[in-house]
Amino acid sequence: MNIILLGPPGAGKGTQARKLEDERGMIQLSTGDMLREAKASGTEMGQKVAAIMDAGELVTDEIVIGLIEEKLEGDHGGGFIFDGFPRTLPQADALGALLAKHGATLDAVIEMQVDDDALVARITARSTCGNCGEVYNDLSKPIPTDGKCSNCGQAAEFKRRADDNEESLRTRLMEYYKKTSPLIGYYYAKGDLKSVDGLAEIDEVAGSIATALDG
Ligand code: AP5
């Protein structure tokens, strides 16, 4: 099964993708994570995208399509969860063509519906385990009081993202509404779209996604 998690910054795409990996053996393909890795390791591409990402703008279609193309050459596991990709209509067309090339199909697009006020609160309270990438939130999922990650058990450094501030978030939201939200109509027209309430508790959202996928 190959699925897309579609939603604005902070909708909970990464959180739900990690749950789907654990529960279904699927593989999360997060273009945001791939770009942050390139940025942290200082590759030529990473240096090129750093300022764009920090400002909250989208990097070029060519770069992210190339990243996804590489991953589709590897292990397909229990299917892919596309997290943060596609984000533009050309990316959506490219994904369709890449999947067809590999004899694969897209099984569902899960739209995670949230409102902007909740996003600001979530994003400014987010932190991530520097060791395994587990996502925490000061309000809904605090870091354990012993300072050890509940996923990997390590006493890791918990990091905040450079683009998790109100100014970048405003740009990220604008980019979402201008360039990514048209994909809702695109996948609705193809009959692939399923919408879930992303404002519910994390486990409830997971339950709605399971129903959308299996029901
Ligand atoms: P990316 O990393 O994809 O960021 P994003 O889309 O802005 O999404 P986030 O990771 O911020 O949010 P999320 O939906 O995963 O939420 P999370 O689960 O963490 O992209 C970053 C940048 O890279 C882009 O701005 C762009 O520059 C570039 N980029 C990436 N892909 C690109 C592409 N395809 N094309 C061009 N450029 C691209 O949850 C957020 C917080 O809320 C967490 O603290 C979590 O614990 C909490 N939370 C989650 N669910 C709930 C819940 N149900 N209730 C309460 N709290 C919750």
Image: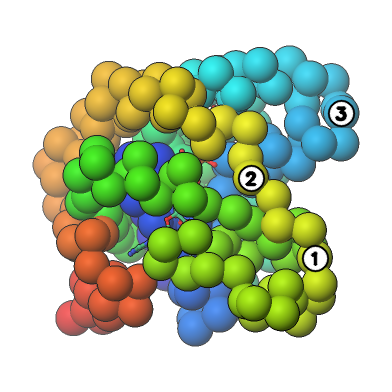
Residue bearing mark 2: 160
For this view, does 207 lie left or right of residue 100?
A: left
For marks 3 and 1, the one nearer the N-term is: 3
Find residue 179 and report its horizontal and vertical position in percent.
32, 22
Q: Residue at x 71, y 79 (%)?
A: 146
Residue 103 seen in the current view: no
Find residue 39 and report its horizontal and vertical position in percent.
77, 31
The amino acid at mark 1 is Ala
* Whole-number angstrom distance, CA of label 3 to CA of label 2: 19 Å
Residue bearing mark 3: 42
Secondary-structure class at tag 3: loop
Secondary-structure class at tag 1: loop
Task: From this view, report whether residue 68 is shown above or below residue 80.
Answer: above
**Residue furthest front as drawn:** 145
Closest to the camera, between mark 3 and mark 2, is 2
The amino acid at mark 3 is Gly
Q: Residue at x 27, y 48 (%)?
A: 118
* Whole-number angstrom distance, CA of label 1 to CA of label 2: 13 Å
Circle 3 crowding by C-alpha within 10 Å: few under 14, some 14–19, many from 20: few
Find residue 156 and report its horizontal and vertical position in percent.
80, 65
The amino acid at mark 2 is Arg
Number of marks in the image?
3
Circle 2 crowding by C-alpha within 10 Å: few under 14, some 14–19, many from 20: some
Residue 53 seen in the current view: yes
Report whether the residue tagged 3 is closer than 8 Å to ligand 1.
no
Task: From this view, report whether residue 128 is shown above or below residue 153.
Answer: above
Give residue 36's quadrant in the image: top right
Secondary-structure class at tag 2: loop
Circle 1 crowding by C-alpha within 10 Å: few under 14, some 14–19, many from 20: some
Report whether the residue tagged 1 is closer than 8 Å to ligand 1.
no
Residue bearing mark 1: 156
For marks 3 and 2, the one nearer the N-term is: 3
